[in-house]
Each structure stands twice: as structure tokens, then as C-alpha cells.
Image (tube, grey):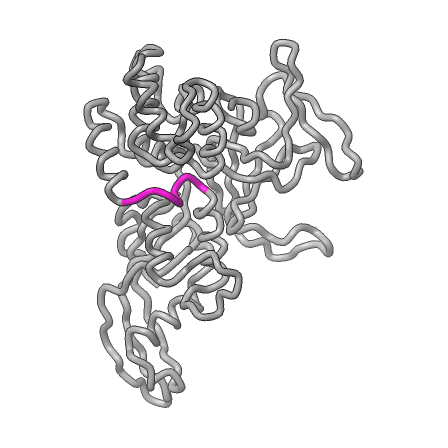
Amino acid sequence: MFILSELEHKLRLPPHLLDLPLQDAIKGQLESIFLDKVIAKLGLCISIHGIKSIDGGFVLPVEGAPTYTVVFCMVMFRPYVGEIIAAKLKDSNPKGLQLSLGFFDDIYIPSYALPNPSHSEPDVDPNRVRWVWRYNDMELLVDEESEIRFQVTSVDYPTIPLEQEEGSKPFAPMVVTGSTDSDGLGPLSWWV
Amino acid sequence: MKILKSNAGHLTNFEVLDLLRSRGASKDPTRVMSLITSSEFKVYDYLVESAACDQTRENINQFVEKSKEYKLAKAEVINIINIRPSSEVELAPLIELEQRGWDEEKLTEIVEMVTQVLPPHPNQKESDEVAAEDDSAKAGDEDNAEDNAEEEMDAS
């Protein structure tokens, strides 16, 4: 799930931070720039692992702040295709399931990736639907409480749209698509 | 921003949890006096409820050593450490069975090794204890589900 990536960034350190120790000031700036943001093809930035080198510190003309070139390692969330991840159910609608990890919510299990044969039943809430798997005369419901394990089938980084309609879902820069169509996948309560 | 190395190493959930803990993350609800941002806390919350919360570096090193005899790929080893399967059916999606041609026994061996070396999932601890009480009548021993698992292995 988590991978270390090494990045280099040219960073402008605002003057009001100059009384802090250099490492801390730079780390703080890096955190405010990168944390909880998605970098295309690298994944979601989780945490700064360590700073490898700080270079520069030049003050360019007309500027009040020094510019540093920092090389650092960062923990990224980037699941690989085929990985099994445990997540919680966030939403269940006619298109399929949406799962959440707490820090990352855009995990979708489309309805064709649910074990065969599954069918949906209407739920109390009109927008939601309950998915049920019929296995050898047993009806197994995708329930809300147990953790759901799924296998990652793809990780996409859609490009930022130029315009968005009013009221549509906020743009998701990283989308993980999964499948629960295999032994041992799906809600844990089905197998334990 | 330049990407120097997109993959400088894979991390198990435990290593990320350890990193956050060493920076001061904890379960206490006030969370003001630490250097962790709220987004990092969300990751901490997720990891603390997963199988990684009770693992130690020794467990992981031991597991990696023992898994060498099965020639598992690195990705599979990391996956197993993160999920900590406690039965064959949970282990099945983690391993590429078709390429290996292993049978049930091999899977059972690996599952037993996993339950022996890695500490159980916090939710599983209760169900392991219930199963252990049913199987062997050890009334005094409620804390160690692992001890019970080992005794079952010795008995069989």
C-alpha cells in the first residue's frame, strides 16, 4: 500500500519562518505543500519520511525569502494492481460499492466486479441499494459493519476537468477500482 | 518539483505506523500536542485498527525469514504481513496459486506459520479466544490466543 518516493523540490522559505531550525522550517513548508495531495502516477502523499539534502539558500533579487533545493523521501499511498486491501463500506448504490480507508475515499467496486450472481435490493434510503450474493442457496448480504477486502484492479489518475457542473461530485484526482470476485474477498463476515 | 525515484522502497503498514508513532501519534482524543497533521492522523486511525497495530519489528523480520523457504514474492510477503490471514480461504487471494501448483497442505502450513509468528488482528483476538475455549478446555489461559494456537499445532 505504501511506497517511498524520492522527490526534489525548489522551495521558497517565507521570512517569518527563518528563526526556526532550518530542518523544521523546511519540513513544515513541504508538509503544507504536499501532504494530502495527489501526485499523478505517484499516488497520495501521506507523510515526509526524511530530508536527504538541503541546498541553496540563495536570496534572489527583489525577493525577501531564500530559495532552497530540497531532496527528500516521502511516504506515498499507491496500491499496486493485485494487492488485497481491507476497507470499510462508505456507499452502496446501483453502480456498485464505494469503500473508504479513512484517509482515502475514492475506492469503487463496480457492480460487475461483485461475485457472481449478485443482485441488489432496495434499501430504506432511496439513493442506496443493498447488494446480496447468492451462493449455493445462501443469501449473503454486503453489510455495513465488517471490513471488506477487495483486490485492486486498477489505479487511475483522471486529468483535471476544465469545467464542472454545479452539484456534481467533487473531482477525484486518484481513483482506485477493485473487485471482490474471488475466494476470501468481500465482507470478512462472509468467510470467518 | 522533480521526481528522482518513484519507488525508493516498499513499506509495510507496520513501518508507516511506526513512523507516525515515533512522531507522536497516539490514540488519545486531544491530539493537540503532537507534530502530526490531521490527514496523517486519519492514516494512523486506519492503521491502528488493522493487523499492524500489535506487530513489532522482530515479528516482521522473523516472518520474512521463515517465508523465504516458500519463495514468496516480495509483494506477497508484504500483503500477508498487512492482512495477516488466519485461515486458508483468507490466504488464497494473496498468493498466486495457479503459477505455483500448491495444494491445500502447503496453504495450511503457511497459515499456521502466519498465526504463530504475527500477532492476531485486534478483532480476531476475540474470535480466536472463543475458538480456543471451545477446542481445548484451558479456562485459566485467556490472554494468549497464540499459545493456544501453538498447543493445537503440537497436539495435531
Q: Is residue A81 visible?
A: no
- Point out the stretch of residues depicted in magenta: B50-56
Residue nearer the viewer, A56 or B81: B81
* Residue A103 % position (x, y): 51, 51
* Residue A132 % position (x, y): 67, 23
- Residue found 28% across the figure and 68% down from its top: A70
- Residue found 57% across the figure and 21% down from its top: A115
Q: Quadrant of residue A69?
A: bottom left
Residue A72 placement, left or right of A151: left
- The quadrant of the image that shows the N terminus of chain A is top left
Q: Quadrant of residue B112?
A: top left
Q: Is residue A88 magenta?
A: no
Q: Quadrant of residue B138?
A: top left
Residue nearer the viewer, A192 or A14: A192
* Residue A99 % position (x, y): 57, 40
- Residue found 29% across the figure and 47% down from its top: B7
